[in-house]
Structures are given as C-alpha cells and as structure tokens.
Amino acid sequence: MSYSALTHHFEQQHHLQHLGAICGWDQATMMPSGGNQARAEAMSALAVLSHQQLQDPKLADWFASANQASLASDQKVSLAEMHRQWRDATMLPSDLVGALSLAGSRCEHAWRSLRPANDWAGFLPLFAEVLNLSRQVAAARADVLGLSRYDSLLEQFEPGMRSATLDSVFNGVKQWLPALIKEVQDKQGSEIVLQPQGPFAIEQQRALGLDVMALLGFDFNHGRLDVSVHPFCGGVSEDVRLTTRYDEHDVALALMGVIHETGHARYEQGLPAQWRKLPVGQARSMGVHESQSLFFEMQLARHPAFIAQLSPLLERHFGTQPAFAPDNLAKLYTRVKPGFIRVDADEVTYPAHIMLRYEIERDLIEGKLEAKDLPERWDQLMQRYLGLSTQGNYKDGCMQDIHWTDGSFGYFPSYTLGAMYAAQQASAMQQQQGSLEQLIEQQLPSIFDWLQHNIWQHASLLDTDALIEQACGQTLNESAFKQHLQQRYLG
C-alpha cells in the first residue's frame, strides 16, 4: 500500500515537472519578452508547489513502511530512486527553492540581451544573486550528505561522482591533450579545405535539420524542433522539445546542433515507457545523457561514412558546390583550432573548455572565487589551456554559457564525462557488431538498437558505473576517448 501511494505521489510530481519543462521551453522559444516577469513568478510558484509536495510529512511514513514490504527487485530500485529525490527535496527550505527559481529566471532572461551587449556590469549583480543562493543550496545539501559543497551540487547531475575523481581524470587529460592539439594542428596545417559558400536560408536549414533528424530515427509524433538563443533538449519523453540556432553564413552551426540535441532526444524517447513517470525511469545522469548527444554528434555525425550521407542532403537543399564533396566535408567537420566558444569547439579542444569551467565553478561554490573576479580567472585559464585572451571580451568569455544563470553549478563536467562514455560505447559496439563505417553504411538502425538495448532501456535502473560496465566492459576510462581522438585525427 505504501509503495503504491508513493508511486502515485511521484507520478503527480512528474506531471508538475512536465508543465515546468514546457513552460521553460516556451520561455526560451515563443514567449514575448514582456511576459518574462509573470512567467518567472509562475515558474517559481510551480517550483515551490512541487517542492512542498515532495516535503509532505506523510512521505516519511510511507518510505518507512515501503522499506519493510516485500518488493520485486525493480520496485526496490524504484523505491530507492524515489527516496533519493525525496531526500534531495527535504534538504532545502521551500523559500530557498523559490528564491533561486525566481533569481535564475530573471538572470537567464536578462542574459539573453546583456551577453550580446557585452554588458558584464549589468549582468554581475544578477549573477551574484544566483551564486549567493546556489552557495546556500550547496551548504544545505553538504550538511545532509556529508560532502563538500561542490560535490553536493555535482551529486545532482552525476550521482556518485566526486571532484576527487574528476581531478584525477582531468589531470590525466592535461598530460596528453596540449601535445595532441599541437600535433593535430601541425598535421592539418597543409590541408586544403573549401568553405561552403552561403548564404544559407534559415528555412532551408530547418528543412535540412528535419531530414537529418528523420535519418537519425527521431519520432516526430512525440517531439518538435524550434529556435532558441542557446540550443537545448527539453520537455518530457512523450513530448521532446529540441531547439537550435541558425547562422545564414554557417550551415554547420545549426546542423551539428540539431544532431547533438537529437542524441539527447533519442535517449529520452527510448526510456522505458512503464517507468517514465517515476524517478527510476529518468536518465541515469547528465554524463550519460551527454554521452548520447556526443555519440550522435561526434562518434557518428563526424564519421566519414555518415558525412557521405550528409553530402547529398546538403546538395538537395542548397545546390551542388565543391565544398559539399564528402572528402572536403570530412576535413571541414574535423578541423581543430582553439577558439573562444565552447559550443562551437571541435572535439579535441572541447575538454579544455570543460576543465576551465569545472575549476571555476568549483571555486565559486567553495567560496575561493567571488563573482566579481570571474572575468579575470576566466582569462587566466583560457590563456593557460587554449592560448587565447578574453580580457574585456565578456560575451565570448565568462558570459557565453547559460548554465550558471539559473544556478546549474556542477553540470559542466558532464560534457567531458559524456565524451568519454561515448567513446567507450563506440568501442564496445564495434567489438560486438563490426566497424562503425560498416554499420553506418549498411545498418544505421542497428546502431540505435545497440544504444536502446545497452543504455536507453535501463534508465536509472542501474547506477552509472554498473550501466557503463555492463555496456562497455569497464567503468569510466579516459583511454578509449584518447584512442578515438588519436585514430580520427592522427590516423
């Protein structure tokens, strides 16, 4: 009885989260700017309502009773995931949850106009408020979990992951990444690469994106594609909302963004239907989620065999030109060059962008770095890791990402963890089914079947280590990622 009551209660939570997700999608894509204050207040109220329901005193009794009940193994895992979500909610007072939601909505909305204006002075007080509230959240979580403040936030996105592990993994990457970047640039320096000649009309880019989503198996009966300032995948499994952004002079920007977000979406659409309304039916972690988007974008879409399928699609929508030849596209989509913008970075320099953000957000939350000092630290690390200066260039520096505007501290490591998990999955898939080249050319759906069987269908029924070990034969290991980069870029 108690277990049934808990499942009903958490199914109601799912419905509230569904509404919040669609409200957030609308805020980023369709809502007129004048509606932001009202929307921020409404989403704050919804966040407080959801939080209060999770703090309902009777849940403690239900959990105590359910823990004594005779449950099937999958029900026990489901109970544990519900308990973890309940535990997270009871750590925080509702007024703090509401305050962070409101401050985050205000900061994120203002960021959309302040970033293009390079207005750090205007952004700073809004960001400082979000940081202050996020530190309060971290302190409250740390007291209950017995973790450091940063690890308590990392736990939200990567259950079981700790900064000590990240330090070890990232320190390993630092040992070989700088030399690899230089070696690849030296190798590519003599290559002749043709740039596609635009402009590329946005409507034609959208049509191309929809064709590629169909090629990748996206279910349009349960999702759609729109435009936002920062690409994302939101909504719920039954109604997945993807967004991208367009540049009439760069067709790859939106195309690769769509492919990346389609990886997220296929994971969401592939989660087990019988568990979707419960915590156990959600994605295991953001690192696992990013492994799916990066598998699609990096392992798959930048593979020469897949590029050979993109080439005729580009010609169908934009006409024939030499730059659309498969060999040229393969060179174009694997160019390595340090740049300012994370979302535009190649897969070789990308880890440097993540390590920079990880070190900064860890110090911000632990109180070792203040908001006002963020631009200076950002510039220091950009020069150290990528040889670039962002002094005075806030829009391409510390203001470029949306994540910190709503307090999503602890999220950034998921991207490089995802790249590593994706490399491990590609390696395991090829050991079991043959080369990616052969699979892409002859059996593209079998790739998605492998991901469905090994990753998607398990949702949170397994912890991250168990999921990756079962699928790949070992837990997190940077070696597959290093090997992938060396093979692709150095031959």
Image (tube, grey):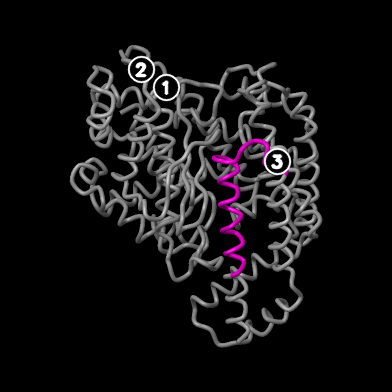
C-beta proximity under 8 Å, tags 2 and 1: yes
N-terminal of the pair, mark 3 or mark 2, is: 2
Marking on residue 362: 3
First to last magenta residue range: 12-37
Nearer the observer, 322 or 137: 322
Q: Secondary structure at mark 3?
A: helix
| Identity, as a three-letter code, of the amino acid under mark 2 | Gly
Q: Which residue bears the numbered disc 1?
A: 248
Q: Secondary structure at mark 1?
A: loop
Measured from the top left, where is residue 323 in percent x and y? 28, 18
Q: Which residue bears the numbered disc 2?
A: 198
Q: Which image quadrant is residue 130 in?
A: top right
Marking on residue 463: none
3 vs 1, front mark? 1
Compared to 278, does 63 lie above or below? below
Distance from disc 3 to disc 2, alpha carbons, whole Å, reads 42 Å
N-terminal of the pair, mark 3 or mark 1, is: 1
Q: Which image quadrant is residue 50 in?
A: bottom right
3 vs 2, front mark? 2
Distance from disc 3 to disc 1, alpha carbons, whole Å, reads 37 Å
Q: Is residue 19 magenta?
A: yes
User: What residue is rendered at 49% in x and 52% in y?
Assistant: 288
User: What residue is rendered at 66% in x and 18% in y?
Assistant: 393
Q: Is residue 44 magenta?
A: no
Instruction: Assess disc 3: are there few (<14), some (14-19) or many (≥20) residues with their C-alpha within 10 Å of its C-alpha.
Output: many
Measured from the top left, where is residue 38 in percent x and y? 71, 46
